[in-house]
Each structure stands twice: as C-alpha cells, then as structure tokens.
Image (cartoon, helix red, strand yellow):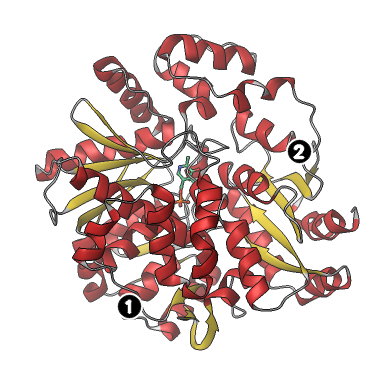
Amino acid sequence: MYYISTRNKSERVSGAQAVVQGIASDGGLYVPEQIPSVTKEELAALKAMEYPERAAFIIGKFLPELSDGLKDWCERAYSRFDGDPAPIVKADGKYFLELWHGPTHAFKDMALTLLPYLMTGSKKILNRTDKTLILVATSGDTGKAALEGFKDVEGTACAVFYPFGGVSNLQKLQMTTQRGGNVFVSAIKGNFDDAQTAVKKIFASQGVKDKLAEKGYNLSSANSINWGRLVPQIAYYFSAYVDLADSGEIEDGEEVVFTVPTGNFGNILAAYYAMKMGLPIKRLVCASNRNNVLTDFFESGTYDLKREFHKTISPSMDILISSNFERLIFETSGRNDKLTKQRMEKLATEGKYTVSDVEMKEIARTFAAYSADDEITKETIADFFDESGYVLDPHSAVAFDATMRFEEETGEERIVTVCTASPYKFAASVLEAIGETVPRDDGAALTKLEEETALPLPESLSELPSLKIRFGGCVDKDGIEQAVINSVIRE
Ligand SMILES: *Cc1c(COP(=O)(O)O)cnc(C)c1O
C-alpha cells in the first residue's frame, strides 16, 4: 500500500516511509492511496479476538509490510494498560468508550504506546540506521504519552514543547518529572497553536535538519499529523462496535453514532476512516469547547481562524488550527490535492477558507457538531455524577453534552461517547464542578477526588507531587530551534 500527500498526489511513498517521515516534504499530510475495506465476515471474526489482536488486524490493513511484527507489538504495547485498553462502559443507559486506561491516563496512549514499535520496525524495513528525534508540540496529553512511549527506546530521542500556562498542573508535572535518558521537555511562551506552528516550521527547515543530521538524527513526529499515530486509533472504533454487537446492545450491522471530544481532529478522523472502511457508523458528532472553530465550520462551510483563543478547563482541546482537518478536506473534495494545497495556503495567509456547497452536503451527512463552554461542561460533570455516579473528565463531558443534545434533536439512542482522559488528570476542575473546595496542593486534590468518587487513583499520578522536576525551562518561539538542536547534543 502506498501513501500520497494531501497537497501533491504525485508524492507517493510506502507506509514505512510515511511513518518514519511523519509529514510530507511539501508540508501536506500522508493518506493511504486506497482506503482498505473490512467485510462483514471480518467484522464478525473480530468478536473472538482480544484487543491487541483486533488492533493488529486493522493496522495490518494499512501497513501490510509490518504485518510480521504487529501482533507481538500490539500485545506488548497494550499490556501496559490497566485491563481492557478500550472498554465500553454503560452508565444510566448511556455508552462510554473509555480510552484512558493507559500509562499516562489519556487516549493518546492508544497510539503512542505502539508508535515506537511502528517507527522502529519501519526503519528496519527501510534499512535506516540513523537515529530519530521525535519532535512534539503538545496541548498537554500527547507530550507525556510520547515521552512514556519513546523513553529509552534505542535509536530514538524525544523532545516535547508545551504551552506555558496552557496545561493542567498534573499534566505539567507528568512532563517535567519525566524519567529517561533520551528525553527533553520545555515550556514555550504562547499557546498550543504557537507551539504547533513553531514545530511545523522546524520540520520544514533544512538548516535544522542538516544540523541534526550531523549528530546522526533525522526528524519525525508523534503528533497526529503522522499516519502512524492515526492508524492505531482506527482500531478502537472497530473494537467498540464489535463489543456492542457481541454483548447484544446492538444488532450485527446496526448503525451507531460516536461523539468525539475534538481538538486537532485526529481522534474523530480515525472514526471517519473506520466508517469509510465499512464500519456501520451513522453519524459522527464533533464536540468542541469554547474554541469552536470546527462547530462554526460545520454550520457555515467556512474555516475561520480569526477569533480569540480561549483557555478552558478542557485544555487538550484548546486548539484553533486543527491539523487533521486537512485530511478531511482532502477526502471530501474528491481527493483534490491542488485545491487542498490552495486552501491550506489561504488559511496560512488569510486565516480562512470556504468549501463548496456540494462538499458541505457530503460533510453534513456525516458530521454533526456542538460546542460547550466551561459552565456547561461543569454542569454536565455534576449532573451526570449525581444521576449515575459516573465521573467524566472535562473533555469527555464536552462530548457527553453533545451526545445529549444530538439525542434530543434526533431521537438517536445508539450513541457512544468517547472518553479521552481520566478525571484525575483534571482533578481540580472536576472537584470544582461537583461542588467541592479544591485543595491547593496537587496531591491533596487527587486524594480528595478519590474520596468523593471512589474511582481508583493510579499510583503513577499520586506519586507525581513527590517527584523531582527535571525540566523546568521555558523558551520563546524563536528559541525553540536551538533548544531542539541542544536536546540531542546534550547526550
Ligand atoms: C488530544 C485530546 C483530545 C483531542 O483529540 P484530537 O485527536 O486532537 O482531536 C481530547 N481530549 C483529550 C483528553 C486529549 O488528550
């Protein structure tokens, strides 16, 4: 199977190359030349499999050259999860797909525990002996998950930049206390979009690449611009569907709706590809916080960046430039690379672009969109906790609010809300939402949330306040280039 760039279809590379490179040389994103399909028989056969085997099956459709290793890698990656990596939980008659049982307690682990194996395996196929520097811009959760995934993995290093003041206390502690000999973390002055733009610039800079090459490093990405990050995410939509069918909650072949709390549009795009592969999905509900650039797009057909950036209690969704939206626009334009390139250039220069009515029709058939501000998010957490005892983190609560609104408008009942983080990662906001006073001390906040909710507190979070800070630094946008180069010279 080959991969093409969303901005130039004649740039065609193997899957292994797409994973190692991360982003196309023209700044476009790699997509598979053909989208593979899954038959009804194959879907039925998934029922008898455990999660790692299901994931290996789906990923193998996209990266057949890695098939030999996949099952073993998936088993190793998902053994780092606490029990089932992607359980469907039913509370008060509603379905929740919990994707936060991995080592860093956010859904990013679903892909980032596996990506190091995909990367290392791909390099082997390509006979590459250079080392890989994984460069990450994070709105909070990708950074930690990438650090845990790549920590002390031979032939790799990992450098992470997060927006100063733009992540929760616990997210910050998770990153600044990171262990491992091949890791580097720094804050960057600005918001997530600034961090992501600075990182994308480095990917495009031959000067930086040359300097890294002198040290024996090539550059790759663990952000969802990398196809290797997206493809493991497609697997859990299949797994969730199969679990619902297997437990008799739905009939085989019955269509379901997924509601996805959305930032960079990676998670929901994986659901879109699952649908294109033949998974019976009726609609995808895109849930945003107050940074509602996508909600407005789905309403108007115009992607318009020119608006205020808001810090919210769901910081991993505080994003205005949703990178993966480029892949959707490419697909729904009939895979028009020239048009996609034009639109992305327009976004960079004018801050907006508009798609055609024909495209919007197709998009509206597939997607619905809602946004919730912090007040609504907190109310949702409080109300559902009162009603059912189920605790939502703020990101999952943004999604659950969208689920309820979609249900009200359409009468749809088979809706799965995708839950992306453990409530403990956002302990202070969750405590506040359920009407508790928030202890100033992070450790005390965790313990208090455990007392209030009886949700088991993971040790990897409770130990954080007692760990030594290893990476307390902060750079400005112009300093990021030097920081990246220094991060590998240091070794
Ligand atoms: C990353 C993240 C999101 C947004 O996911 P995208 O794939 O970027 O749309 C939502 N919730 C949490 C907790 C996250 O970490």
Q: Compared with residue 330, is residue 75 higher up or lower down, i.e. above or below?
A: above
Question: Residue 90: x, y in percent?
Answer: 25, 31
Q: Which residue sits at x=68%, y=40%?
A: 164
Query: Which of the 4 image quarters holds residue 172?
Result: top right
Note whether residue 308 is visible: no
Quarter that holds the N terminus: bottom left
Question: Residue 404: x, y in percent?
Answer: 21, 36
Binning the other alpha carbons within 10 Å of mark 2 as few (below 14), some (14 to 19) or many (20 upward) gives: some
Note whether residue 281 is visible: yes
**Camera-nearest residue between 399 and 144:** 144
For marks 2 and 1, give the CA distance: 44 Å
- Tell whether 221 sits left or right of 303: right
Element at label 2: loop
Question: Residue 96: x, y in percent?
Answer: 30, 36
Question: Residue 429: x, y in percent?
Answer: 48, 23
**Camera-nearest residue between 2 and 144:** 2
Which residue has dot 1 on it?
Answer: 333
Q: Amino acid at mark 1?
A: Ser
Q: Compared with residue 251, is residue 427 higher up or lower down, i.e. above or below?
A: above
User: In terms of sequence position, does the residue under pointer 2 or pointer 1 come before the other?
Assistant: 2
Element at label 1: loop
Q: Which mark is residue 179?
A: 2
Q: Amino acid at mark 2?
A: Arg
